[in-house]
Image (tube, rainbow, N blue to C red):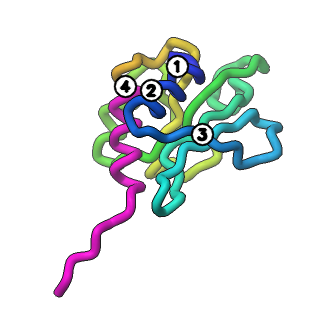
């Protein structure tokens, strides 16, 4: 899945379009919840070196939130990295160059969406 296919998945599945949160040095697209404005996915273009890959080529990636107990199972997946520029205990970076499987991208997107959505307060 590339960045455009990922954006189409998010729009089709959640009905959410991206916005551009930065003055685009990273060519960044942010997907936010409409009610609380929290990000659940941040697509950007970074140098592979930022992921520990010995290359100055650029790669499209997406940062998404993930439950720490699930992250351990995802580390062995191709195209999954410790989060770039985010809390590595709660966020992952996934490659959008075809190396990370579509199933893994969709699975983590669903988790990230749920973890960042508005919480319903229970009455006491």
Q: Position of residue 119 (x, y in %)?
A: 33, 66
Q: Can residue 8 be spotted in the picture?
A: yes
Q: CA distance from mark 2 to mark 4?
A: 13 Å
Label 1 Cα crowd, 10 Å radius (few <14 / some 14-19 / many 20+): few
Residue at image position (41%, 17%) is 101
The relative height of residue 14 versus residue 57 in the rendered view (above or below) is below
Which circle, 1 or 4, is nearer the viewer?
1
Residue 29 within the segment the image draws in magenta? no
Label 3 Cα crowd, 10 Å radius (few <14 / some 14-19 / many 20+): some
Q: Which mark is residue 70?
A: none
Q: Which quarter of the rendering shows the C terminus? A: bottom left
The residue indicated by pointer 1 is 5
Q: Which residues are magenta?
A: 105-124
Q: CA distance from mark 4 to mark 3?
A: 20 Å
Residue at image position (70%, 29%) is 45
Residue at image position (39%, 56%) is 117
Pointers 2 and 4 in contact (C-beta within 8 Å) = no
The residue indicated by pointer 4 is 104
N-terminal of the pair, mark 3 or mark 2, is 2
Which circle, 2 or 4, is nearer the viewer?
2
Residue 123 within the segment the image draws in magenta? yes
Judged from the image, the secondary structure of the residue bearing numbered disc 4 is helix
Which is the main secondary structure of the residues drawn in magenta?
A: helix
Pointers 1 and 2 in contact (C-beta within 8 Å) = yes
The residue indicated by pointer 3 is 18
The residue indicated by pointer 2 is 9
Q: Position of residue 62 (x, y in %)?
A: 56, 33
Pointers 1 and 4 in contact (C-beta within 8 Å) = no
Residue at image position (52%, 12%) is 98
């Amino acid at each position: 899945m590339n960045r455009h296919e990922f954006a189409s998945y998010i729009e089709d599945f959640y009905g959410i379009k991206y916005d551009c949160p930065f003055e685009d040095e990273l060519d960044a697209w942010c997907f936010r919840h409409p009610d609380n404005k929290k990000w659940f996915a941040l697509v950007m273009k970074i140098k592979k070196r930022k992921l520990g890959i010995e290359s100055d080529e650029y790669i499209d990636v997406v940062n998404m939130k993930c439950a720490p107990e699930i992250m351990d199972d995802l580390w062995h997946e191709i195209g999954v990295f410790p989060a770039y520029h985010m809390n590595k205990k709660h966020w992952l970076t996934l490659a959008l160059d075809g190396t990370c499987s579509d199933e893994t991208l969709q699975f983590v997107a669903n988790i990230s969406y749920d973890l960042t959505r508005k919480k319903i307060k229970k009455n006491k």
